[in-house]
Amino acid sequence: AGGQAPSENGDAAAAEEEEQQSHKPSFSRAASMVRRRSSVALIGSLIARSKQNLQASQAELDARREAEEAERADAKAKWVDSAFAVCLFCIDDQHSTRAHEFLKAAFRLFPTKDYCVLTLPHKCMGFPLLRNFTRVQPKPASSLSHELYVFHKFGLLPNFAVRRAENHDVRPLRTLLEGPADARLVMADVQASVAREQRLSKLRAKAKSLKPKVGDADSDAGATPSESNSRAGTPSKDRSASRSGGGGGR
């Protein structure tokens, strides 16, 4: 009996150990499933958050695009409402130099308008009235068969002069244009004009510095021997006299 007790205890311990060994795979499998489910939940939350961010950014882009389109439409309506057009203009040649006086009468008829516009075919000959107008540069993709000319009513003011914008005009113009819907477009045109004028001034200065050198070279190439000798510092007559004197001595 004493020998059977240890064997029974050993069998019980072995059975318990076997049971624990049999439960180990199920525990590890459960832990791995829990980790997998947590990772899946984390990935799902990340995907949902990214979708929300994309939707918010898309909504912001749509709102910005709508605001820009509304701003562009308002600016276009403002320009259209502030101008009148010359559809037909006839004047005798002997009075054509006084054509600008018609503009005064036209703006008196349209006191709420700021601009007078007219269009002409590309091959149309100019006439004196166009001297008061400014030609609008067409866009590269424009297919219109006419040129657009614009005149502002402030052009009728006496002692009124217009010049190209310079670099020191950018800051005051930015302050002056605060508020209008198309201020950004106007400032972009001003800055582009200033940059183009600076490039042209540099090219003019460079050409001016090179012009005397080219002129001197051309004059030297086309000069006669006597002129080249006189430029060298020894007159041609003195050289011929010295040569003849030397010959007589010999």
Image (tube, rainbow, N blue to C red):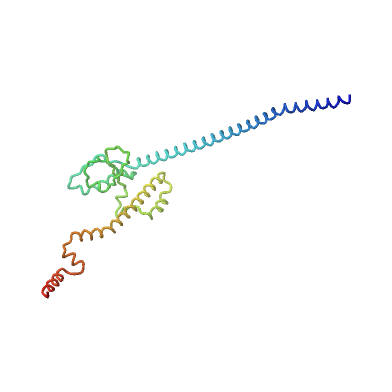
Q: Quadrant of the N terminus?
A: top right
- Residue extending farthest to the bottom is 249
Is residue 162 rendered to the left or right of residue 72? left
- Residue 27 x, y percent position in the rendering: 70, 29
Is residue 186 rendered to the left or right of residue 125? right
223 or 122: which is nearer to us? Answer: 223
Residue at left 36%, top 51%? 195
Q: Quadrant of the C terminus?
A: bottom left
Residue at left 85%, top 27%? 6
- Residue 124 x, y percent position in the rendering: 22, 41
Residue at left 41%, top 50%? 174
Count every numbered label the image shows and give the total. 0
- The relative height of residue 198 versus residue 62 in the rendered view (above or below) is below
Location of residue 109 (image quadrant)? top left
20 or 82: which is nearer to us? Answer: 20
- Residue 122 x, y percent position in the rendering: 24, 41
Location of residue 65 (image quadrant)? top left
